[in-house]
Image (tube, helix red, strand yellow):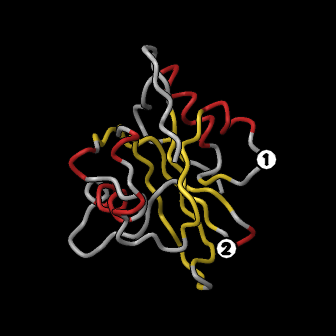
């Protein structure tokens, strides 16, 4: 995986996972809450399981957005409630070889904000580029943004 962009000015990049189901799409790491977990601890576990990021290397920030979605997962209809958090992590801490549950992930890739804005590929959550643009300009929202789709 190429390294995350870096510079002396603030930048935003997103590590997305490629899936082939439902016509193919890219998505942020995530998944279901496990027994005893909450929405602040689950992202750390998911980042460890899917792209192989050491939990200790993750700085979990504010909740940026949420969405409710009915869709197919592994051929089953599910209602998914997603909460998107700002996280900070170095590209050197992403190691797909450490991923313990890569699911059907085909690829991991860092996307710049410019790439997210111009891609013709499907990226979930929908509106990710606009959400991250707002964070870069204004900082994290005071209340989570409700995303469509």
The one nearer the camera, 56 or 134, is 56
Determine which quarter of the picture holds residue 18. bottom right
Which residue occupies the extreme right position in the image? 120
Residue shown at the point (51%, 48%) measured from the top left: 1
The image shows residue 146, relative to residue 132, as above or below, that is: below
Question: Mark 2 = which residue?
Answer: 21
Q: Residues within 10 Å of mark 1 (few under 14, many from 20)?
A: few
Q: Is residue 61 left or right of residue 70?
A: left
Above or below: residue 39 compared with residue 58: below
Residue 104: x and y, percent? 54, 73
Residue 3 - label: none
**Left or right for 109, reference 46:** right
Q: Residue at x 33, y 53 (%)?
A: 53
The percent position of residue 147, horizontal first and vertical second, equals 58, 49
Mark closest to the chain's N terminus, 1 or 2: 2
Please name the residue shown 30% across and 43% down the image.
Answer: 60
Residue 120 is tagged as 1
Residue farthest to the bottom, as pictured: 76
């Amino acid at each position: 995986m190429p390294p995350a962009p870096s510079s002396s000015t603030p930048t935003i990049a997103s590590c997305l996972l490629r899936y082939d189901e439902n016509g193919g799409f890219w998505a942020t790491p995530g998944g279901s809450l496990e027994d005893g977990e909450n929405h602040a601890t689950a992202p750390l576990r998911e980042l460890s399981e899917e792209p192989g990021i050491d939990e200790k290397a993750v700085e979990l920030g504010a909740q940026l957005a949420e969405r409710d979605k009915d869709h197919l997962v592994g051929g089953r209809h599910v209602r998914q409630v997603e909460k998107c958090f700002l996280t900070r992590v170095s590209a050197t801490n992403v190691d797909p070889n450490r991923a313990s549950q890569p699911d059907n992930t085909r690829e991991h890739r860092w996307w710049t904000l410019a790439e997210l804005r111009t891609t013709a590929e499907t990226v979930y959550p929908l509106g990710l580029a606009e959400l991250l643009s707002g964070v870069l300009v204004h900082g994290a929202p005071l209340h989570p943004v409700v995303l469509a789709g």
